[in-house]
């Protein structure tokens, strides 16, 4: 529906219909997997679990409430309170960093581009270009985005990149 996009960059109604199952299953699987791994990481880290429990209990109402009778304003208020819990935020982000629900993705370059590098470029033949500061990506190239690789890179996250380090957020 975005008329400002060129026709070849729009998703047709037919393509959307073909992908609805993917959207539904991918959304539920990624959410359930994230929750499962979060619960496992909390079970393995009782100190973190207890601190998170204390933060969550600090906003719990004194008496039970009937969630089905909340007004839109009450729901929004509750959402805002939960969204602003700093420890919950840190633990959630760290769980997703450590065990991302999507490990990688493939994208297609829609135009020629240059991707900057901080390390020497390694070619397919094994040779290394020491002084090159970018990789040329021609339009139409497939690009593998290694989300898990980025999330566990010791050069970015430090030597303990593979450990549950909730305080870094």
Image: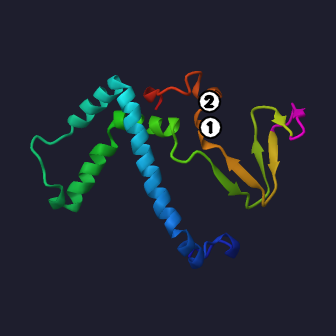
Q: How is the image coloured?
A: rainbow
Q: Which residue is mark 1?
A: 150
- Nearer the observer, 6 or 121: 121
Q: Determine the CA span between mark 1 and mark 2.
A: 8 Å
The local secondary structure at tag 1 comes to helix
Residue 159 falls left or right of residue 47: right
Instruction: Tell me where the magenta segment starts and ends, as one range.
Output: 124-133
The residue positioned 75% from the left and 45% from the top of the image is 115
The residue positioned 43% from the left and 29% from the top of the image is 166
Q: Position of residue 86 (x, y in %)?
A: 35, 35
From the viewer's perspective, is the residue at label 1 or at label 2 nearer? 1
- Nearer the observer, 45 or 11: 45
Q: Position of residue 126 (x, y in %)?
A: 88, 35
**Relative vertical location of residue 165 with respect to residue 65 in this rendering, above or below:** above
Q: Position of residue 156 (x, y in %)?
A: 62, 30
Mark 2 Cα within 10 Å, few/some/many (few <14, many 20+)?
few
Give the mark nearest the N terminus, 1 or 2. 1
| 88 part of magenta stretch | no
Q: Position of residue 85 (x, y in %)?
A: 32, 38
Residue 2 falls left or right of residue 127: left
The residue positioned 51% from the left and 26% from the top of the image is 163
Q: Which residue is mark 2?
A: 156
The local secondary structure at tag 2 comes to helix
The residue positioned 75% from the left and 33% from the top of the image is 118
Whether tag 1 and tag 2 are in contact, CB under 8 A, the answer is yes
Name the quadrant containing residue 74. bottom left
Mark 1 Cα within 10 Å, few/some/many (few <14, many 20+)?
some
Residue 86 falls left or right of residue 11: left
User: Most prominent secondary structure in the magenta stretch?
Assistant: loop
**In the rendered view of the protein, which quadrant contains the N terminus?**
bottom right
| 129 part of magenta stretch | yes
């Amino acid at each position: 529906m975005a008329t400002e996009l060129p026709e070849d960059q729009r998703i047709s109604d037919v393509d959307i219909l073909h992908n609805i199952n993917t959207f539904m299953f991918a959304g539920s699987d990624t959410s359930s997997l994230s929750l499962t791994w979060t619960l496992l990481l909390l079970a393995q880290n009782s100190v973190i679990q207890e601190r998170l429990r204390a933060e969550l209990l600090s906003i719990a109402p004194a008496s039970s409430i009937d969630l089905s009778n909340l007004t839109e304003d009450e729901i929004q208020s509750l959402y805002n309170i939960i969204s602003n819990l700093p420890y919950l935020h840190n633990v959630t982000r760290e769980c997703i960093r450590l065990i991302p629900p999507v490990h990688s993705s493939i994208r297609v370059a829609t135009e020629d581009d240059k991707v900057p590098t901080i390390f020497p470029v390694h070619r397919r033949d094994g040779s290394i270009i020491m002084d090159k500061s970018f990789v040329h990506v021609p339009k139409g190239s497939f690009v593998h985005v290694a989300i898990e690789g980025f999330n566990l890179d010791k050069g970015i996250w430090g030597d303990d990149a593979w450990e549950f380090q909730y305080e870094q957020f």
